[in-house]
Amino acid sequence: MRWLSKVPSVGNRSGSSLAFPTLFGRCMRVSPSNGRGWIGCHYRCQFCATLFLILSTSDCRAAVQLEPIAPGVYVVLQPFEDRFNDSNSTVLVLDDGVLVVDTQSTLTEARAEIKAIKHLTKKPVRWVINTHWHNDHIQGNQVYREAFPGVQFIAQVNTRRDMEFRATDELREQVESLPGRLEKYRQLLAASVGPGGRPLDENQRSAVEMRIRIFSKQLPDLRQTHIVLPDITFDTSMSLHYSGGEIELSYFPGHTDGDVVIFLPDEKILIAGDLLDDMPYTGDGSPEGLVETLHRLDALNFDLIIPGHGGIEKGHDHLRLIASLFGSIVSQVQDDVANGLSLSETKNVVNVNDFREPVTGGEEHATRAFDAFIPVAIERAYKEAKGTIE
């Protein structure tokens, strides 16, 4: 098999309402009637502007299972009980090796995934694609390098830059801040008093206990983690040819400045990273760019979408719904900027109520995420319209 660069492009993020540091999660189950299963689980921690942390609803994840979805194509989906924890991975078993898309965030999870791959095939992992720079998609890289010394890591050029600086800085901040956060949560639990001096209710207590368990498990792993950078980068597109067909990598920004989608045209499968969770987060990307990206992805002939978080999407309906939502945000914000409204005024007048039920299905966590990520998208779109985006 051979990599060909510069070929023509296929198309150019809890159950409690605690107010300290707020972690927003989302997950929803949609009835089978609309062709969708478990979708788009994601989390975002606000003690640092772009810091991802892992949340789980159980003490430890069940054994990793590689679920086949097409010949030679397997997915590692987070189980429902751990739907806030980590990212999905895709595993492609090719002629003379294995290709993995995204490596999750902890060394423990990555080791479990590698164990499952070795049980599946004796072929080595020869390539790893990081779809973007967020730590929940890249921090397992070092485990793959340890297990398969010849593995090559592939990413878009902007992702390598952001992994080298932003992801590395965030990992260091996690290691430095988690002990203090753990101590704060232990003090809150011991005093049974939350923000504002109000007693912790049952949901808040459960959330604090969960965070203590999860962060305590994370910290030893994080202290041993370092960021392994891509060996191969590309700008617009790249293709892998093998006897069974072709794997197309293309640059489609929106969630970040370096998002890559992986398209399997023969299998009609699109591996979308975090560009198409149930409610994409655009705080590190571009709402306007996301709309353009989704429209261009819609032109591809795919039947299934594997998102970075949550369950597999069938067909194009969800993509079109999310494109319409963000298109409405961008259009309204641009009008508000043209009319001289401030950011605060714009946040108050942008109306996305018609999208709330279709996107969230009324599910509590999905609704919480919708309410958390929409203001982020509005602010980002406002800065884009004003030309002040950093």
Image (cartoon, helix red, strand yellow):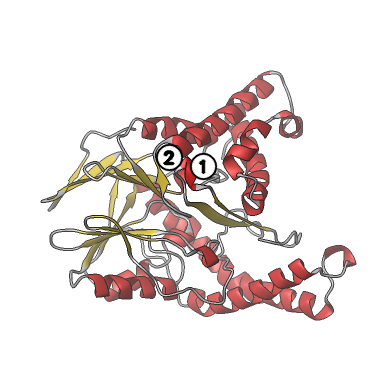
Real-space Cα separation, disc 2 to disc 1, in angstroms? 7 Å
Give how far across and how far down residue 382 sits, in percent: 63, 32
| Rendering quarter of residue 303 | top left
Q: Is residue 343 rendered to the left or right of residue 225?
A: right
* Quadrant the C terminus occupies: top right
Residue 282: percent from left, percent from top? 55, 43
Inspect the image, locate mark 1, and give the three-letter code of the amino acid beneath it: Gly
Give the secondary structure at mark 1: loop
- In the picture of the structure, the residue carrying the numbered disc 2 is 253
Is residue 121 something that shows in the picture?
yes
Locate residue 221, reporting x and y percent.
Answer: 48, 77
Q: Quadrant of residue 127?
A: bottom left
Residue farthest toward the right in the current orientation of the protein: 197
Q: Is residue 126 above or below residue 268?
A: below
| Front-most of residues 163 and 380 | 380
Disc 2 element: loop
| Above or below for 319 versus 112 | above
Q: Is residue 327 above or below residue 43?
A: above
* 210 and 38: which is toward the camera: 38
Crowding near the residue tagged with mark 1, few <14, some 14–19, many ≥20 C-alpha atoms within 10 Å: many
Question: Label 1 near label 2: C-beta < 8 Å?
Answer: yes
- At a point 55% along the width and 61% down the height, the residue shown is 84
At a point 55% along the width and 33% down the height, the residue shown is: 326
Q: Position of residue 145 (x, y in %)?
A: 30, 70
Residue name at image x 75 percent, y 59 percent: 17
Q: Which residue is mark 1?
A: 285
